[in-house]
Image (tube, rainbow, N blue to C red):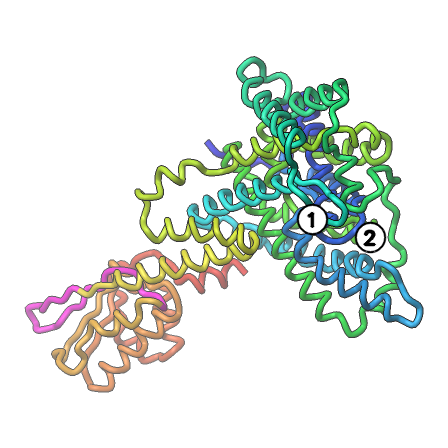
């Protein structure tokens, strides 16, 4: 049974705290890696993950869901940051890292857009995403997470990245396998300790005690050009208001990047919310999540964070580790900040292999393996959507994949329904020809609908019965209007029966003469024209 859940701070404090610590450890290399993608300092990514995680945990629409700096948004912002840096160097008084200041300005706009989406209740539209799109999304994202981990099997030699070889590779594989083994078998013995946290701690202890020369969080940061985790509290970025004047002539780039970041962030966050809803059999609030995501990105712009959105990998780690309340997200965010402030030297010793093992288990848990079993059982159109969304997620990005999947599904749905319109014909004793319409009448089926009638060859009296037809939009109304005028122009007597009250109202607005041909003495179906319903909601 599914029930709505938005306000629970904690269900089980112990589970929330331990799962939050696990997530915080997994967040570190992710935030650092995405910072490198965006060409910014790793601390900016870590601050972004902290602020995103804290605000969305406290005020978001989905307890237990984790937000932070993400690769999907990093890829979008990198071009703007690069152009901003180039502009900064051409100014009369050169400004280093101007692209980063532009990012903070952009995040303010992103926050307003996302918050507005929540205020205007647009988050509910995530429920319209078809199930094949959802399955394609999780499969594609699992593949993306897997591919991202393969980069951890490389090391920097000079200016190049080289695959690990020999003993280095074997040790890395062994540690990854050990972490995955712990995560698989420990829950069979006890569920009191999150398996992911146990795997990270045990593997870290083995590498430190054994003095193994392996890649660690610290070496990963230094290989990417960073100086380490150690930092201070995020500072208010007063300078961004002075930097606004440097954007003159580049507002097009800022706004286009902001809209794209907002769209990518909301789609990934709402899709993650939908997935966690299914896992936990509860329902979060998409609108609240939009508002929280917007507020968190505004805070990132003001305090110098990278910004971000929901993270499916960390969210699944959290939920599977027992983190179901808001406390788990709060602990993850606060622990991440504590790592930066006080525990940098310790966290930098965690082997990358342990974190890769955790993410590999996330991949296994995320991928919808059932899709292989049902692929030949579901309609071909659904199978095509599932495969297409998975492929586009890997090839392009999540936002493009989901939009493509929804568009394909909508086209298929419209095509199928366009061919369903039927017209049964019979003659009454008084010579009246009756067309009994069956099926939906909407923009896709109006052509087939109009082809059912023989205006020139019909008798003097014609009746069109809509009791088994649903008029779904204004295109359907227009088709009825055009057909009625054809019969009336030939002086034939036409009656329209079983029209809904909304259809009658719209037809009478189009032409008051319809009052003479609409039958009102019999019961009419109780359904609504879609556009009319939307007007009522607005």
Instruction: Point out the residue furthest to the left here.
Output: 429
* Label 2: few (<14), some (14–19) or many (≥20) C-alpha neighbours in 10 Å: many
Position of residue 304 relative to residue 83, above or below, is above
Q: Residue 216: x, y in percent?
A: 74, 32
* Disc 2 secondary structure class: helix
Counting residues from the start of the chain, the first of labels 1 and 2 encountered is: 2
Res. 490 image quadrant = bottom left
**Which secondary structure is most common in the magenta stretch?**
strand
Q: Residue at x 61, y 23 (%)?
A: 178
Quarter of the picture containing the C terminus is bottom right
Q: Is residue 439 magenta?
A: yes
Look at mark 1 in the image and give the residue it sits on: 308
Q: Residue 315: x, y in percent?
A: 61, 36
Q: Which mark is residue 302?
A: 2
Instruction: Point out the residue furthest to the top here.
Output: 189
Q: Residue at x 80, y 66 (%)?
A: 86
Q: Residue at x 66, y 52 (%)?
A: 73
Bounds of the magenta segment: 424-443
* Disc 1 secondary structure class: loop
Q: Is residue 153 left or right of residue 47?
A: left
Asked whether the viewer can see residue 324, the reply is no
């Amino acid at each position: 049974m599914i029930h709505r859940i938005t306000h629970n701070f904690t269900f089980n404090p112990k589970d929330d705290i331990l799962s939050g610590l696990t997530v915080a450890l997994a967040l570190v290399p992710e935030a650092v890696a995405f910072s490198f993608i965006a060409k910014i300092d790793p601390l900016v990514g870590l601050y972004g993950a902290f602020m995103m995680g804290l605000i969305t945990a406290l005020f978001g629409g989905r307890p237990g869901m984790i937000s932070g700096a993400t690769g999907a948004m990093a890829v979008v912002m990198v071009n703007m940051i690069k152009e901003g840096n180039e502009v900064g160097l051409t100014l009369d008084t050169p400004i280093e890292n101007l692209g980063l200041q532009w990012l903070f300005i952009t995040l303010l706009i992103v926050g307003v857009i996302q918050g507005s989406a929540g205020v205007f209740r647009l988050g509910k539209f995530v429920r319209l995403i078809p199930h094949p799109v959802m399955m394609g999304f999780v499969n594609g994202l699992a593949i993306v997470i897997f591919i991202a981990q393969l980069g951890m099997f490389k090391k920097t030699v000079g200016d190049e990245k080289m695959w690990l070889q020999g003993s280095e590779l074997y040790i890395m594989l062994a540690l990854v396998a050990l972490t995955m083994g712990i995560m698989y078998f420990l829950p069979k013995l006890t569920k009191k300790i999150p398996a992911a946290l146990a795997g990270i701690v045990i593997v870290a202890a083995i590498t430190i005690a054994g003095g193994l020369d392996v890649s660690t969080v610290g070496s990963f940061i230094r290989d990417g050009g960073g100086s380490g985790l150690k930092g201070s509290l995020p500072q208010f970025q007063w300078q961004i208001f002075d930097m606004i004047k440097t954007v003159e002539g580049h507002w097009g780039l800022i706004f286009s990047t902001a809209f794209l970041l907002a769209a990518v962030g909301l789609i990934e966050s709402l899709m993650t919310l939908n997935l966690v809803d299914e896992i936990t059999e509860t329902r979060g609030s998409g609108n609240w999540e939009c508002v929280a995501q917007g507020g968190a990105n505004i805070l990132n712009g003001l305090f110098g964070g990278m910004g971000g959105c929901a993270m499916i990998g960390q969210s699944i780690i959290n939920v599977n580790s027992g983190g179901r309340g808001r406390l788990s997200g709060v602990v993850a965010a606060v622990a991440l900040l504590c790592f930066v402030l006080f525990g940098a030297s310790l966290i930098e010793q965690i082997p990358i292999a342990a974190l890769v093992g955790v993410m590999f288990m996330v991949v296994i848990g995320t991928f919808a393996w059932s899709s292989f079993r049902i692929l030949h059982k579901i309609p071909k159109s659904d199978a095509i959507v599932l495969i297409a969304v998975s492929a586009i997620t890997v090839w392009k990005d999540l936002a493009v994949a989901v939009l493509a999947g929804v568009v394909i599904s909508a086209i298929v749905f419209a095509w199928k329904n366009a061919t369903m319109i039927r017209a049964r014909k019979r003659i009454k004793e008084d010579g009246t020809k009756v067309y009994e319409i069956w099926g939906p009448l909407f923009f896709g089926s109006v052509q087939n609908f109009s082809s059912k009638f023989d205006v020139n060859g019909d008798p003097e009296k014609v009746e069109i019965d809509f009791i088994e037809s649903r008029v779904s939009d204004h295109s359907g109304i227009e088709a009825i209007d055009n057909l009625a005028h054809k019969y009336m122009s030939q002086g034939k007597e036409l009656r329209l029966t079983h029209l809904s009250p909304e259809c009658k109202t719209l037809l009478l607005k189009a032409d008051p003469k319809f009052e003479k041909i609409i039958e009102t003495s019999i019961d009419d179906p109780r359904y609504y024209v879609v556009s009319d319903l939307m007007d009522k909601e607005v």
